[in-house]
Image: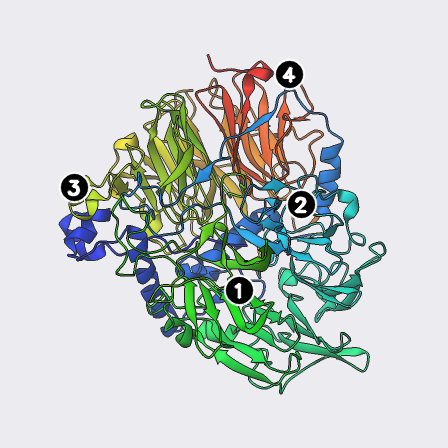
Amino acid sequence: MMPHRHRRRLMAGVVAVAALGLVGSQAYAAAGTTAPRPWGAHHQADIGRQHSRLVRSGHPMTALKPGARPGGDDDGSDETENSAEATAQFTEARTAPGVVAPGAYGAAWQQLRSMGHTAGDWGHVTKKVYDSDDPRYRDVNSNSSGGAGHVTGRITGIAADDQGYVYAGGANGGVFRSRTGNGHWQPIADKLPSLSTGTLALDHAHQLWYATGESNTGATAFVGTGVYVLKDPRHGTFQPGGRVGGAELESTVIHALRFAGDTVWAATSRGVWSHSATELSGPWKLEFAPNPAYLPGGSKASDPAAPYKNIANDIAVDPKDPSKVLLAVGWRGGDSYNGLYAKRNDGWQRVAGLGDLPSDSTDVGNMTFAAAADGSRLYAIDQSPTQTTANPDSGLKGVYVAKSGSPFGPWTQIADYQKLRGSGSALQTAGYMPGVQSWYNQFLQVDPADPDHVYLGLEEVFETKNGGTSWTVPGPYWNFPFPCWSIDPSKRTGDCSPTTHSDQHAVAVGSYHGRSWIYVGNDGGIYRRPLKGAVDSGGHAKDWQSLADGTIDTLQYYSVGVGRDRTYGGVTVTGGLQDNGQSILRGRDRVMGSDFGGDGADTITDPANGCNTAQEYVYLDMWVTQDCGVNNGAWSTDPTKATEYEIAPPDKDLAGKGARFIAPLAADAKDPDTWIAGGRHVWVQTKGYAIRSGSEWKSAYDLGDGHLATAVAASGGRVYVGWCGPCDSQGFTRGIAVGNAGGTSRTESGGGTGWHQLDLPVSGAIPNRYLSGFEVDPADADHVYLAVNGFSRKWTEGPGAGVGHVFESKDGGDHWTDISANLPDVPANTVKLLPNGGLTLGTDLAVFYRAPGAGRWQVLGRGLPTTAVMELRLGPDDELYAATHGRGIRSFGIRSLGARRH
């Protein structure tokens, strides 16, 4: 879900040497480290200290309160909550000013199917291996050499059989099939209305069950459209008609599917449901919802806390008696309904006294179960809301086993975070130890042939071969802390063995030709190793294999930049990614590299020279390079050889109050050296890619206390800025500020001077929803288009939700016209004007096109998967590039529309 932002950068680590005038790598070299690590490695220690300081000082951790945004009034100040904040902000853009009713996405998808298409097909730009350890890019702000190797986007569901077939579900990328468990993937769910993966499961009849709605405790990140079944997963593809039941599970998040005899159980964000596993028609049955008044149709359904009031995390079934079921229910931040429940006298009641397994509402948070194949063992992980709030090091309460195999115990604790820390973990820093994100990172898998052999996923991959007496860490977070690591570009990750990407979500055991494999899914894709593989002296695996071979692309882009490749010809394509840094694909490349690490966000790229790139981490933490970030690591011994520079505007230092998690950036369409960055302030700098310090930004306008920019655009000095604040459903407010890049100078178009806020009443022409993107007509700065996120009032229970998703103004924003016409009612993220006067709109379902002079919209081309399009960008090669949040970067030739650059 969520994720992330995380921790792959240092927010304040250079403060101690700032007086020397040094930044980035120079700061670390000056600090005298004997073996300098990339910036991301230092960042983790820094945020651990920050996390520890906040918790020990009594920070309220309002992120953990039901209905509150992660981070609360101080969001962003504790980056261990970045995963939650990323999801919260992504969600609120789609739900504010209220709560979205079930069926919204399904209705939009049905309308989409009835629309016509333009000529032309989408190309797949990023259908290539993405090497996060590419030795070409070892500058100070790259994570290259960390050991994760080939990566793709977050994998949140895995299923595997004994014939070599493996199925992987992307967070918002759908399901892929490998016929030998060794890559060579094929998409098999692209015809469904939702590609958001909750979980995957194979039943006893070898049918593949696909639960949509990404499984996390963020409640509403990318909700799904229910559960689908594929009867012949080895050969078939999922179809909309394969949905189980009716619309009962639409617009939910599904955490787990569990089978008990002929019944399938579903743990969802709206309680626990059941259905026949053999007869797929008929509705799902609601088994238990702790707070039914908050369900759709209930008396409190419109309450902002409603999405957090009925979260179910997992279900455990007694192998000897399938009628005995234990429910793990609760919001990760704690609520009075959190706990374990069992059926007693035809009703569900709390259960306690099961041994060591927590049952109190203060200690039952995100919980996962895993059973041995022979029924002799049942294991559990528990994240404690109380510990998450009070302990800066970890929220993990423990790992437990019931040696009876029964969910009713007795349970014995077999690990806590300190035991796991001492087992070879890379997470040794106070404030950042194993389980610090256990509300987000969890999996458990028991070896089918050995009930004492267990794999545990948190931020890292752990393994025990003796039922929990001792543990190893076959998949450490990264290799930077270990003596075997070096930045040497002739080696992948020094003398260390490759590891997995961090942040574990999914797991399965499969076999092929008699050999068994463990498959793990995380924020960097899917990896495998022999089930009983080899480890080094530190307990780290020597045999991980990434299955991100370029045929599975679940990359979650926030942005895309395109510029001419002056070295190799063609174009350089780059983009910011959820937890996979900034990818770069140059003109002749067959493999993508990563020139910036961590979370990539917005980006600015020079159309005339693709090696000129500015990249945002999160919260306006910006960096710039003028050589594509090419570096052999020489900066680690000679600081002057670093070519990546931190240029963050001052809002970055306001602990999350100064900017959104993904803050908007833009270069002036007519002056590429003038850049706009939006936080609380509207920041302007005029040195282009030659900027070297954050002090070179100037504040052009203060949006006001609590107001944060959501979209920016500029042309000829005229600047448009959309903002929100508060940004969630509790008092949501939005606005538009218009002014000049110079603050008081006149614009090219001769408009007025200075800055002003547009008059946007709650019930005015512009809906009271999240403003996600502008496009300014290059011929007239008063002519501007606006993309609006969220759903119209038919689906949104909130004040001023209004109607429409794309608006046009011809007088600088004083008056607006809704030009949505026949568009589906679905969140819109980005709008782009083509050279022929046609207009394109990127949404959560598709890209749409309105021809010049036309009033109605068409679907743009064919071949674009049903996933969110976050940004549209015109390249210098007459291609329109789409950054999708789940299926990589795609491109469309605008010449087929009669549109091309002149």
* Residue placed most toward the observer, 509 or 748: 509
What distance separates the C-alpha of mark 1 from that of mark 3?
A: 42 Å
Q: Earlier in the sequence, mark 3 or mark 4?
A: 3
Comparing 241 with 103, the one in front is 241
Q: Position of residue 259 (x, y in %)?
A: 73, 65
Vertically, is 772 above or below 891?
Answer: below
Q: Amino acid at mark 1?
A: Gln
| Residue 743 drawn at (x, y percent) | 34, 33
Q: Quadrant of residue 159?
A: bottom right
Scheme of image coloration: rainbow
Give the residue drawn at x 62%, y 55%: 160
Q: Looking at the image, tell me whether mark 1 or mark 4 is earlier in sequence order.
A: 1
Task: Name the image quarter holding residue 679.
Answer: top left
Foreground: disc 1 or disc 3: 1
Residue 65 seen in this snapshot = yes
Mark 2 or 4, closer to the camera: 2
Q: Which residue is mark 3?
A: 640
Which label is found at residue 853? 4
Q: Secondary structure at mark 3?
A: helix
One can see residue 10 in this view: no
Q: Secondary structure at mark 1?
A: loop
Q: Percent from the top left, x then y, of residue 643?
A: 24, 38
Could you say which disc has been placed on residue 194 in the image?
2
Task: Name the amino acid, label 3.
Answer: Thr
SS class of the residue under badge 2? loop
Real-space Cα separation, disc 1 to disc 2, in angstroms = 23 Å
Residue 867 lies, with reference to residue 875, above or below; the image says below
Pointer 3 or 2: first along the chain: 2
Question: Which marked residue is nearer to the observer: mark 1 or mark 2?
Answer: 1
